[in-house]
């Protein structure tokens, strides 16, 4: 493997790890709210968070440009106050991976939270425990297998993100070319041997993550 391939591998795992870290935190919080709270617009909110899972990645990337581009609704203020833009940086790749992986974390974790026996939660409240303590001592431990499965699936999804990343971060060699973008470039330039190695590596890695996620999912039943 040459330096370009090694760089793309390192960057892909770097982006996936950072995206998954924030996906886990945000996803657990949102999943808990959707599983326990009852408020108007709850299902609409669920649809909003699930949309990146079914929308074409280029559409997700387009929305991110509208929001975080240099002239976007949020990006223009970031650029105005800091002189910096997330566009065409590896941070943009991490943002794109975060957005497309978040729905998997929310769906998996919400299902896990909803499977917790409500009587155990009520018993915790009866014993005088606060909601936070109940979440930490009862809900999270009983949901840990589903949470881990969600994290694994989210990491695999973040690692394989392509369309939204291409639009937000671009395909800049030595800067934003993640593993999937490098495969795309190699296929376009006819470097089939290198592309084959990356494709096989990516296929094996993704299969391993799916196997791990399935193992934890079966233990939830």
Image: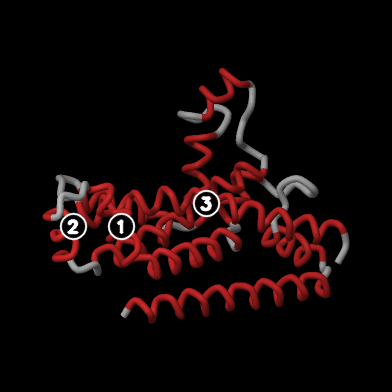
Q: Position of residue 155 (x, y in %)?
A: 54, 62
**Which numbered disc, 1 or 2, marks the residue that appears first in the sequence?**
2
Q: Which sits in the foreground, 160 or 72?
A: 160
C-alpha distance separating marks 3 and 2: 29 Å
Please state the horizontal and vertical placement of residue 73, each as a whole percent of the image.
46, 29
Element under disc 1? helix
Question: Which is more toward the observer, 88 or 46?
Answer: 46
Q: Residue furthest left?
A: 126
Work out whether 187 lies above or below 72.
below
Q: Is residue 5 left or right of residue 62?
A: right
Residue located beneath label 1 in the image: 137
* Tag 2 residue: 124
Q: Is residue 98 above or below residue 210?
A: above
Whole-number angstrom distance, CA of label 1 to CA of label 2:
9 Å
Secondary element under disc 2, as helix, strand or loop, is: helix
The circle drawn on residue 21 is 3
Q: Is residue 94 left or right of residue 26?
A: right
Could you tell which of marks 3 and 2 lies nearer the N-terminus?
A: 3
Quarter holding the C terminus is bottom left
Which disc is residue 149 wearing?
Answer: none
Instruction: Using the image as rendered, state which of residue 160 and residue 136 is in the foreground.
Output: 136
Q: How is the image coloured?
A: secondary structure
Residue located at (53% from left, 29% from top): 75
């Amino acid at each position: 493997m040459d330096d370009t391939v090694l760089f793309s591998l390192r960057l892909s795992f770097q982006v996936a790890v950072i995206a998954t870290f924030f996906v886990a935190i945000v996803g657990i919080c949102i999943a808990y709210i959707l599983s326990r709270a009852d408020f108007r617009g709850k299902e609409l909110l669920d649809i909003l968070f699930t949309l990146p899972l079914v929308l074409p990645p280029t559409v997700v990337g387009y929305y991110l440009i509208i929001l975080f581009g240099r002239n976007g609704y949020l990006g223009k203020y970031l650029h105005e106050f800091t002189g910096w833009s997330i566009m065409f940086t590896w941070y943009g790749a991490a943002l794109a991976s975060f957005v497309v992986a978040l729905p998997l974390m929310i769906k998996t974790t919400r299902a896990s939270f909803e499977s917790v026996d409500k009587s155990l939660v009520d018993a915790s409240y009866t014993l005088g425990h606060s909601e936070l303590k109940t979440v930490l001592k009862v809900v999270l431990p009983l949901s840990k297998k589903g949470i881990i499965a969600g994290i694994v699936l989210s990491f695999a999804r973040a690692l394989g993100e392509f369309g939204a990343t291409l639009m937000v971060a671009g395909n800049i060699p030595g800067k934003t070319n993640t593993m999937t973008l490098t495969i795309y470039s190699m296929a376009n330039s006819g470097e089939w041997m290198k592309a084959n190695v990356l494709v096989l590596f990516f296929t094996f890695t993704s299969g391993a993550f799916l196997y791990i996620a399935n193992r934890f999912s079966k233990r939830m039943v």
